[in-house]
Structure formats: C-alpha cells, structure tokens
Amino acid sequence: PESACFTNSVDTSTITVSISQDFSQVSESQVFNLIHTCLAQTLNLPVTIYDVDHASLVLSSFNGVVSEVTDPISYDLVLSSKPLADVDVTIASQDTALVLSSPSSVRFTPENWNVPQTINVDAVDGGVAGDGATSKRVLLQHSGSSADPNYDDAEISIVPVSSFQVLWYLPASPKVVLSVKTLSIVEGDNVVSTAKYTVTLDTQPSSNVGISISCAENEELQISPNSLTFTSSNWDEPQTVTVTQPQDFKYTGLSTEYTLAHAVLEGSDSLYQVNSFWPQTTVTVTLFDTDHPQVLLSTHSGFVTESSQNTTYTMQLSSIPSGPVTVDISVSNPSLVNVNPSSLVFASDTWNEAQTITVSAVVSDEPLSDDLLSATAILSHSATSSDVFYNGGNAQFFPQEFYLVRRYESIQDSPCVSGTYRNGFECTSCPAGFQCDNPSTPPDPCPLGYFAVGGQSTCTACPQGYMCPSPLSNDMIACLDGYYSELGQSTCTRCPAGVSCPSTETANSVACIAGTYSSGGQTGCTPCPAGKQCPDTSGDSISDCELGTYSETGFSSCLPCPAGFACTATDRAPLESEKCTPGTYTLSQGGASSCTPCPPGFECPITDSESVSPCADGEFATGSAASCTPCPQGMSCSVTLGTISSCSAGYYSEEGKSACSPCPPGYACQTPTQLPVICDAGTYARNSAQSICEVCDAGYKCPTNIPDHRPCS
C-alpha cells in the first residue's frame, strides 16, 4: 500500500515496490527514493531499478542456404524494445558478388518497433567465388543508425545469434559433352582418312549455346562443321563433327599430333560459360602422313635387242620436295646398253611430271658367247637434294633403286616364275602394293588392310593389333591402348563407350558394370568418382551430387542424406558428428545439408521426422527445443512466438497457464508470482487488477472480503 496504519509499536506492515515493463531502454539501472513521512519525520529509502529492455535486433530462425537454382530465403526483423526515435537498420552482404538482401535497409519507428519486417536473401545470378570455391559462408552484417543512442551502433546486437551467416553454393554447371578425347586420321580422301566424333549438351539450356571448333596448328585440316548451335529443343541430339586432311603431297613425318580447340561462343547461355566441356576442352588428332618421299620408277626391268628393240621407263617424285632433286643414272656395263638422259632434275613445281628414260642396246659386231643367250646390265640410281628426305642414302626408290636390263641378240621366250608377271618378252617382278598369283596376267592391287613389298604372289594381311596405312610397304603401326584391330585391318578401331578393350588384337570387349564408365578408347572401366553420379556406363551423363545428397567411389547414383542427418559433403556418407541434435530435425525422406532448428512454439523430440508438435496451452518453447516447458507462475507465455513475460502489477498467473489474470475485487495481487490475497478488515479493493488493498476511509467500515467500503450506520 501507499500508506500504513500502526496501533502500537509492535505492528508491522509489508510494502511492495514494483514497476511494469515499458519496453523502453533508458539505462542499465536507475535509483529512486521512496519517501516515508510520519509525524513530521521523513525517511528516504533508495530503490534501484534495473532495466531489462536491452536494445537489440530480434531475428526469426531460417534455413540459410542459397544458390541460383533454389528459391530465395527470408527472415523477419523486430526490435527488442521501444526506441526513443526512428531506427534505420542496414543489411550488408560481406560478398555482394554471391549474396544480396532485399530490401537492404528497413526503418523502425516508436509505433511499429515490434511489427516484424521481412528480409529476402538470394544468390546473385552468375555469381562465382573469387577463390574458385563451390560453397562459401557469407556474413550478413546489420548496423543501426538512430537518434536513440541505444540503437545507434555500427554492429548492433543480434538475438538469438551473435553472427548471422548464409551458406552459398555453386550449382553443378552444365557440360558440353565431347564423345572422344583422341582421333586418328590418315591423310587423303578415302574412307579410312575420315574421323568423326559427336557433341551434345547434358542439360537443357534456357537460350542457344554456340560451339566453335578450330585448329590453330594446321589450317589445312578440314573440320565440318566448324561451329555448332544447340537450342532448348535439340540440346540432347548428338551433332557429328567430321575431320579430314586432304592429301597435300608434303611430308611432315610419319605422324603428327594436332589439337582441336572447342569454345562456347559469346552470347550463349550463361550457365555454359564456366567449366563447360567434358571430359576436356580439346580433342587430340593424330595425323598419319601418306606422302612418303620416294622416287617412283614406272617399272624395274626391261629388255633390249640389237635389232632396235629399246625399252623405256618413267620417273617422278611421290611428294613435293623442299628443294630441287637431281637423279643420276649409272650403267654397270656401258658396253651393253646406253641410257638417255643419264641425269634428271625435279623441281618443286615439276615434281609429279613424269620424265622418260630410254634404254637402248649398244650395237656390236661381236656376238655374245655361245653359252649365253643374253647379258644383263644394271642401272643404278642416286639422288642429291637440299631436302633431307631426297638426299643420298635417305632417298628411297620405288619399286627399287636398280633397273635391270636384259640385252638379247634375239628375242628369247621363257616361262615366268611365281611373284613375277609377263611384261612383253620379260618376266617382271610383281611391284609393291600388288600381288602376282598368275604370271600370265597383270598384277592385282592389294586390298585395304593388306600389303606387299614387291615380288609377292599374294598380299600379306595386316596382323592383329596393328594398322597398315599403306599397301606399298610393311610399315606397321601398333594400335594404341583402347584401340584394336583384327587380321586384315588398315586402321585401328576405337573401343566403344560403355565397354573396355583389354587387348589390342581382338574386338572382344568387356561391358562396364554399374558404378563404372568408359567414354571410349579405354582398356579398363573407370569407377565413378566420389561426389558424382554416373547413370550410364558411357560416361556421357556424369554430374555432381547436389547438396544434401552424396556418393562414394563406384556409386552409380547419388543417395539422399539419411533422415536425422545433415550431409555437409557430397563425396562421403554422413558422419556420426553430423547427426541432428534434439531440438533440430531433417525431413523424414532425408536429403538435407543442414539440420533445421525447431521453430518457436513447437517441440521436436525426434530428429529424423519433419513432424513438429505445437506446444499445448500453458507451455512455451523459444526455438530449437526438444520439448515444451510449462509456463512459470507469474508469467504469460506466447505459444506462437515462443516468448514469455512477467505479469503486470495487479495480475497473477499459476504455473501452466499461458495468460495473466486480473486480481479479483476484494483481493490484492502484490507480486505476479503470488496468488490473490483477501483484503484484511479495515482495507478494501474496489476494482479488479489491484496490487494493494486501500485503507478504509474515515466514516466507513470495511469488513473482510467486501470489495467496497460502506458508510458507518
């Protein structure tokens, strides 16, 4: 009460001092004096009041994960106490290249300080972390500006967390899929000279994607087409690229490697601008040169007689020389035959013009010996040039370096042996690249995959595990690992995608099992890497596991994170330490990268269920609660907000009650934690919600439990 009446010196009276919560922060504490006056005596009693209305921002809980492929997230802001002036709160992202908030600032006034204002947070389209990371925690900083000093702070206090972070992650980028890493082609325009591969996309684009293909090292390499366009309708249809090398008659070596470069054209779908190609950006082309430098002789033998029977043959080069080539012809026995001309010159512009050599018999009055029907002369050829391939011992003559001349006094006829053929009156050795199984008929060319070095009755099949690009020689090239050839093949065949080819000598392949893949040209299947999924064994559709799923090495698909766990990594199963704690949960079907805090006003006793139970009337939970708590005596509890506050003066509550009740008339509620106390005789409480009983006025009587005083009768 505000006054007390004493009838003797041993009487006592209890005085209760309380103050209602005003939700305004004035200072940490203030001191007031209670002035007591009795019989002209004054006594001051100091009372210290501690302010519980600390100025801070109150944030609602939320799932702080954003990416370009997920919806924006949001949270609510309110002030914890009523400000003395307007408060401007600024929300600043630590990394504006990845995460932005909207709005970036809000204003609270003394009238709307406790009305929640919603902040939306979203990932920046096309955002890329500066360090190349695929995920990053971005701090959202909140600062206050106000004429109220309690809210004028560069880093305002935040409840319930001291730091407020958003997890940003980069979604798996779509890929331009190349069907091969390497190609082999043979120079020329025949079937074996053409190599092909395909290009496709693994994800439907929102706009067109253009691809350019080029080879900076070899401008004569023909790429058709050299640009591709994929749309939202044909993105998954493979487009074929054909690579050929026209015969240029210039020898650069047995084989040369060139690089096909692929690039996404400017203006294409932005999602295809980063890390766009799989398995790599380039295709390596191995070109086998068929322009082997040779001096070509039209034939390797002939015959002459003294009776004006001459023989001729021609000579030309097989490839363009880098400098003039001089070929000299010498005769082993000049007394038998003459040669005209005995020296020829081939220039870079006349290299393929055949020059004729005439061989004639030297007329002699002396007959050959009686025991000889004919005599033989050998024409030897040698070349000199600044082109190293046509100089001295490096120069190769085809079909051979020597030309044999049989000199007769008269025409002789004899049967030809196997490996030769009848050429007029001579038996001629079968040329390279031909077979002579019947000496009486002209030579037959060797088919593809076969060769003959000259003088053969049958062509030789290219052995297993090798390629034989030229039928003119036995220069065999071993197949690379991941390629194979069977008997009689001119080229090596690339092992198809989805299988492995452990041997280069047979087409027998081994199918890849689930969880492994082969993109082609492999001797073994590759296990699917951890953190990725390989739905098919060709490797065309390999993709990263999304956040909240995982795979280990050899998995064909990504598994959802088990219910009750948060999967922070995609390349392993969740750890025991990643199990959700009571008061948090993940969806019952799993697939979460973080545990969700139980919302205010609910209890979450089970961590592997999305079912959260609301608190019953008279209970409360402030958030992240495993169970609800009964509302304490003397307090009011908001079930929906999960907040509690003390009952005001004149009000009370019992334990387990959510609302404060006004003290009834005739009773006083001195403290919120006490139940109503009936007014003593001589006092009264006329109204409800009184914290003290008033002293009965003079001329009135106040019986016990009577709400109002009554006049004395």
Image (cartoon, helix red, strand yellow):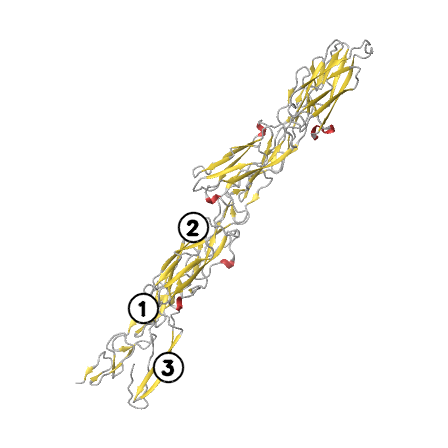
Report crowding for label 3: few under 14, some 14 to 19, many 20 or more residues within 10 A (C-alpha).
few
Q: Describe residue 666's horizontal placement relative to residue 324 as left or right.
A: left
Frontmost of labels 2 and 3 is 3
Instruction: Please give the residue where the numbered disc 3 appears in the rendered image.
Output: 46
Report crowding for label 2: few under 14, some 14 to 19, many 20 or more residues within 10 A (C-alpha).
few
Instruction: Please give the residue where the numbered disc 2 appears in the rendered image.
Output: 70
Mark 1 / mark 2, whichever is N-terminal: 2
Frontmost of labels 1 and 2 is 2
Which quarter of the rendering shows the C terminus? bottom left
Instruction: Please give the residue where the numbered disc 1 appears in the rendered image.
Output: 659
Mark 1 / mark 3, whichever is N-terminal: 3
Task: State which quadrant residue 146 falls in.
Answer: bottom left
Residue 60 shows in the view = no
Q: Amino acid at mark 2?
A: Thr
Q: Against 231, is 638 above or below? A: below
Task: State which quadrant residue 599 falls in.
Answer: bottom left
